[in-house]
Image (tube, helix red, strand yellow):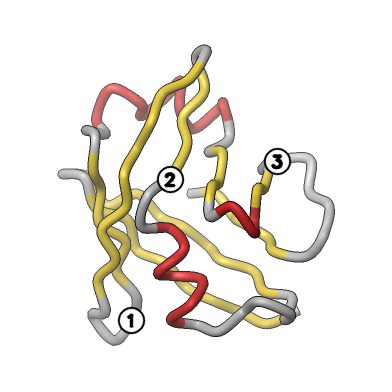
Amino acid sequence: MFCICFGVSNNDVVIGFMQGVVMIPNSFGSDFGDEIDRYTVLVDKNNNEFEVRVERINGSIFFTRGWDALRDFYDIRGLRAWFTVVFLGLGRFLIKKSNL
């Protein structure tokens, strides 16, 4: 499990929020990186699904293409938000959004 925080500086996650790119914490990548393919699915409590591309750059793992759809769906452009992300396995993550 890890958290993604928008609009706030966070030591665990590097955020390129406006570019629609999120770097996954290295600790997660070292433990589970081999279990994640080029695409993954993020699922919320209402079973909304977001397909996100996964890219590996210099040993780091990023959610890239498709991440901005999640940002737009929740309309968090100017809003501070916190996502808890739980790896379910088989290329799927459960996400829970909380406002800050």
Disc sitting over residue 23 in the figure: none
Q: Amino acid at mark 3?
A: Asp
Closer to the chain start, of discs 3 and 2, is: 3
Question: Above or below — where is 52 with respect to 62?
Answer: below
Q: Nearer the viewer, mark 3 or mark 2?
A: 2
Mark 2 surroundings: few (<14), some (14-19) or many (≥20) residues within 10 A: some
Name the residue tied to disc 2.
64
Name the residue tied to disc 3.
12
Which of the two residues, 96 or 21, is positioned nearer the viewer here? 21
Name the residue tied to disc 1.
45
**Image quadrant of residue 77?**
bottom right
Closer to the chain start, of discs 2 and 1, is: 1
Closer to the chain start, of discs 3 and 1, is: 3
Secondary element under disc 3, as helix, strand or loop, is loop
The residue located at (70%, 40%) in the rendering is 12
On the image, the x and y values in percent for residue 99 come to 68, 82
**Image quadrant of residue 34?**
top left
Real-space CA distance between mark 3 and mark 1, rounded to the nearest whole angstrom:
24 Å
Real-space CA distance between mark 3 and mark 2, rounded to the nearest whole angstrom:
17 Å
Secondary element under disc 2, as helix, strand or loop, is loop
Real-space CA distance between mark 2 and mark 1, rounded to the nearest whole angstrom:
22 Å
Please indicate whether residue 60 sits to the left or right of residue 5 in the image. left
Question: Above or below — where is 73 with respect to 61?
Answer: below
Pointer 3 and pointer 2: residues touching (CB < 8 Å)? no
Q: Nearer the viewer, mark 2 or mark 1?
A: 2
On the image, the x and y values in percent for residue 60 come to 52, 23
